[in-house]
Amino acid sequence: MLLSEPIHDAGVARLEKEAEIQVLQEASSEALARAITGADAVIVRLVPVTAEVIAAGQRLRVIGRHGAGLDNVDLPAATRRRIPVVYVPQANSISVAEHAIGMMVALSKHLFDLDQAVRTGEWQRRQVIVGMELEGKTLGVIGLGAIGRLVAEKGRAAFHMRVLGYDPYVSALPAGVERADTLAALLREADIITVHVPLAAETRGLIGRHQLAMCKPTAYLVNTSRGEVVDTIALAEALHAGRLGGAGVDVFPVEPPPSDHPLLHAPRTMFSPHAASHTEESLQRMAVSVAEDVLLVLRSERPRHVGNPEVFTK
């Protein structure tokens, strides 16, 4: 059993009951390809599992993804080898939803600016740093999977927000969520825009210059999904030009982002290092869940969460 990166001790303990574990010293596709030759199973977090890595795994029987997305695994390559790819589609939903809500609150209240004013002795700055109430504002939720639904629910329950939802793949909306027929309609009306879509061909670059130009100049954008969904250069331009109220970003197209990335120097921003799911509870749930599904496959049993179920067809 090969781990590309460390996972929660609870997951390790579950694996150690039935497998011998090796953790890579270097979290990279190159190191993974070198080490995977004799492995029956691999569990990865952010390291890409490329077609080359899969080809090098001559004994590989299962790939575990410690996370809700599968964009860092070459699913077609795994499927061609009839290797199941298991993952944890809902284990981190609560943590990511709470992180998104936290970013909304921090941005709308300018909490970091106010904190800095106290630390630097600029107490009087409070008179010019004016926040916004979330109560009754319009929350635009892009993507109504497990996380998006939780954010919608929390926005309504905590702040009595009007919630607009955009997801062309969802037929029945959660209670209290109004359907936005188009992305443009959501962007034009929302005071807070939060993104919760998987990375796919149709979501890559979903929000670019054209879409940002539709937003209210006072709107806040929060992205805790995938970095490639939002054009971060266009986002930086909109913030520098005052065409957007602010942005909270947990994910970048390249991670970590280069120090000269314009978004890192844009005003009215807050960032986290792809850490929205990093809570004790979420990390434990993800580790145990992926460990159990990997062990099910190694016992020739059907896993609970598999990204390519066609590998089990005769």
Image (cartoon, rainbow, N blue to C red):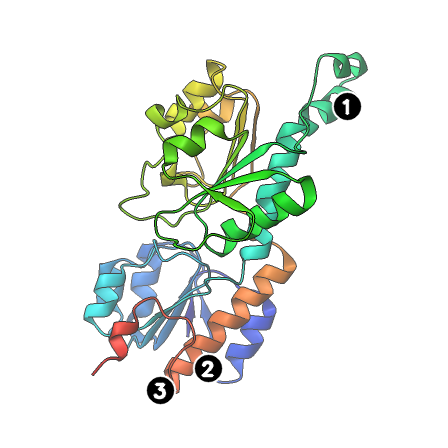
Residue 179 in picture, x, y percent from top left: 44, 43
Q: Nearer the viewer, mark 2 or mark 1?
A: 1
Residue at 50% over, 56% down: 146
Query: Camera-side residue: 163 or 209?
Result: 163
Residue that carries the numbered disc 3 in the rendered image: 300
10 Å neighbourhood of mark 1: few (<14), some, or many (≥20)? Answer: few
Mark 1: secondary structure? helix
Mark 2: secondary structure? loop
The type of residue carrying mark 3 is Ser
Q: Quadrant of residue 284?
A: bottom right
The type of residue carrying mark 1 is Arg
Residue at 35% over, 52% down: 169
* Residue 33 image label: none
Residue that carries the numbered disc 2 in the rendered image: 19
In this picture, is 41 found above or below 76? below
CA separation in Å, label 2 and label 3: 14 Å
Query: Camera-side residue: 199 or 8?
Result: 199
Mark 3: secondary structure? loop
Residue 298 visible in the shown view: yes
In this picture, is 90 found above or below 161? below
Q: Quadrant of the N terminus?
A: bottom left
Residue that carries the numbered disc 1 in the rendered image: 119
Q: Of marks 2 and 1, which one's residue comes earlier in the chain? A: 2
